[in-house]
Amino acid sequence: MYEDKTVICKECGKEFTFTAGEQEFYAEKGFVNEPQRCKPCRDARKNASRLEREMFVATCATCGKDAKVPFRPKEDRPVYCSDCFAKMKSE
């Protein structure tokens, strides 16, 4: 029923393929407009709107290494590096 279409990206001007599978997915979801940007331009646009997370340095409560975390550590709560956190989670 659907056939691959070639579409011009409105951001970079390059051609990209709007595949039959993508068209079927769009139809199932009820989307009426075709994509106007290629995948790299869509990804770049999505990432540009994201704010960079502020990271905080803390000392791991288990091994003592420095750990970067996306929250402000509190004195009364332990903080774990990613390795120790993963070990605790798997146990």
Image: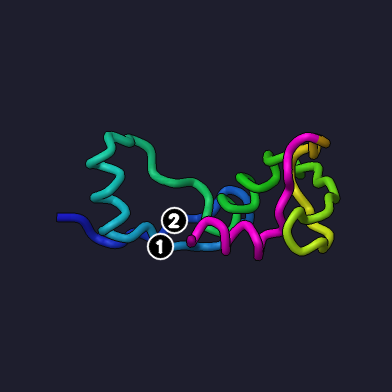
Q: Any mark on residue 45, and which?
A: none
Question: In the structure shown, which secondary structural element does the residue marked by tag 2 occupy?
Answer: strand
Q: Position of residue 41 (x, y in %)?
A: 60, 54
Q: Amino acid at mark 1?
A: Thr
Task: State whether residue 37 is above or below residue 84.
Answer: above
Q: Does 81 appear in magenta?
A: yes
How many neighbours does mark 1 have within 10 angstroms: few (below 14), some (14-19), or many (20 or more)? some
**Residue 87 vs residue 31, the one in the foreground:** 87
- Could you tell me which residue is drawn at 48 percent across and 61 percent down? 91
Toward the left, the furthest residue is 1
Residue to which mark 1 is pinned: 17
Q: Position of residue 9 (x, y in %)?
A: 54, 53
**Left or right of 47: which side holds 57?**
right
Residue to which mark 2 is pinned: 7
Q: Name the image quarter holding residue 84.
A: bottom right
Q: Position of residue 90 (x, y in %)?
A: 49, 61
